[in-house]
Image: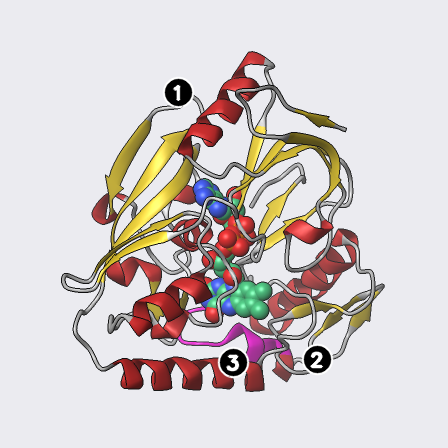
Amino acid sequence: MSIKDLNTPEIKAMVSLKSFNTWKIGGLAQFLTEPKNIAELSQVLTWCKRNAITSHIIGAGSNLLINDTELTGLTICMRKMNGCKIDAKTGIVEAFSGEPIPNLTRKVGKQGLHGLEWAIGIPGTVGGAAVMNAGAQGSCLADRLISVKVISLEEGNLFEIKRNELQYSYRRSILQKEKLIVVSARFKLEAGQDTNKINKLTNENLSNRLATQPYQIPSCGSVFQNPKNQKAGQIIEDLGLKGLRKGGAEISSIHANFIVNHHNATAKDILDLMATIQEKVQKKYGFLLHTEVKRLGFEEIS
Ligand SMILES: Cc1cc2nc3c(=O)[nH]c(=O)nc-3n(C[C@H](O)[C@H](O)[C@H](O)COP(=O)(O)OP(=O)(O)OC[C@H]3O[C@@H](n4cnc5c(N)ncnc54)[C@H](O)[C@@H]3O)c2cc1C
């Protein structure tokens, strides 16, 4: 079933969320839409307001655990609001929220812009990465960000927020708390750099990831944040938990901070493994491992 009038983008009903996240887990969305531009996004927000329907925002779903039950309200997937403008002379780049991070990394590299090589293997969108302050190898999205443009979920107005107002820290930003939708982000990269060098570094980073992380099996990347000066993966590995299974989920034997969906895992399977890890870490080391992954459709949203 789908709802569409002349002025709104298509809103589908009872859509499986499994193909909207990299864990390939989740129940049905009561309603789902994929706006392609700001005008369409504004229209669906108006539709929500008019019908008193709650909304949930997702990018590529590469940092999300979605519950197995029906997700009431409208899920707004930003993947189709993509594209970017690159000024190779100044290094200023403006990318729409749905632009995949690996695509952006390749596009800017080809134009001789240095500064995003670390991001190559992150399968999220620009919007999700801005919210999460995605990072790798000591770099993070906030390093090169100038500002984001957002739309308020409640008022529907569009405005810009500068980086220093976003309170960025390790995998954190105020965007995780505010009712705002990121529609685009502006970056300043280093212009006029050697494209061969950029390409070489980008390829090395990708090869390194492919060699050390389980990329071919559905996952959400690192489940837990690294405690200060420690690696969550090493802590979990030292506890002998690699390979532990619950239902269709498994603590990866390649990288212990990844929980993979090896066969029809449910959200409950993943949560059970997460709880086991947290309990064992707490018991042995006396601290709590905090989750990096966000949850959707649960009573408590982390
Ligand atoms: C194989 C693999 C490797 C990974 N490696 C890394 C890594 O090295 N470093 C790292 O930091 N992460 C990594 N991740 C996690 C993930 O890719 C990042 O967190 C990414 O930035 C999430 O982007 P997304 O578009 O998928 O966001 P989603 O997972 O869709 O959403 C994440 C959160 O952001 C919100 N959100 C998404 N888009 C918007 C928007 N436009 N406006 C407002 N809110 C929004 C959602 O509501 C949710 O709360 C990895 C994941 C996988 C599967």
Residue sticking out furthest to the front: 6
Whether residue 151 is visible here, answered yes or no, is yes
Q: Are marks 2 and 1 in contact (CB under 8 Å)?
A: no
Percent position of residue 121, x then y: 49, 72
Q: Sequence-wise, which precedes: disc 3 or disc 1?
A: 1
Residue bearing mark 1:
155
Q: Sequence-wise, which precedes: disc 2 or disc 3?
A: 3
Horizontal side of residue 240 vs 167, given as left or right: right
Query: In the rendered structure, which amino acid carries the disc numbered 2?
Result: Lys
Query: In the rendered structure, which amino acid carries the disc numbered 1?
Result: Glu
| Label 3 C-beta lies within 8 Å of the nearest ligand 1 atom | yes
Q: Are marks 3 and 1 in contact (CB under 8 Å)?
A: no
**Magenta extent:** 227-236
Query: In the rendered structure, which amino acid carries the disc numbered 3?
Result: Arg
Residue bearing mark 3:
209
Residue bearing mark 2:
242
Q: Is residue 229 magenta?
A: yes
How would you rate the neighbour count of disc 2 (Cα within 10 Å): few for under 14, some for 14-19, many for 20 or more? many
269, above or below 295, in the image: below
Horizontal side of residue 113 vs 24, given as left or right: left
Residue sticking out furthest to the right: 247
Q: Sequence-wise, which precedes: disc 2 or disc 1?
A: 1
**Number of numbered tags placed on the structure image:** 3
Whether residue 226 is visible here, answered yes or no, is no
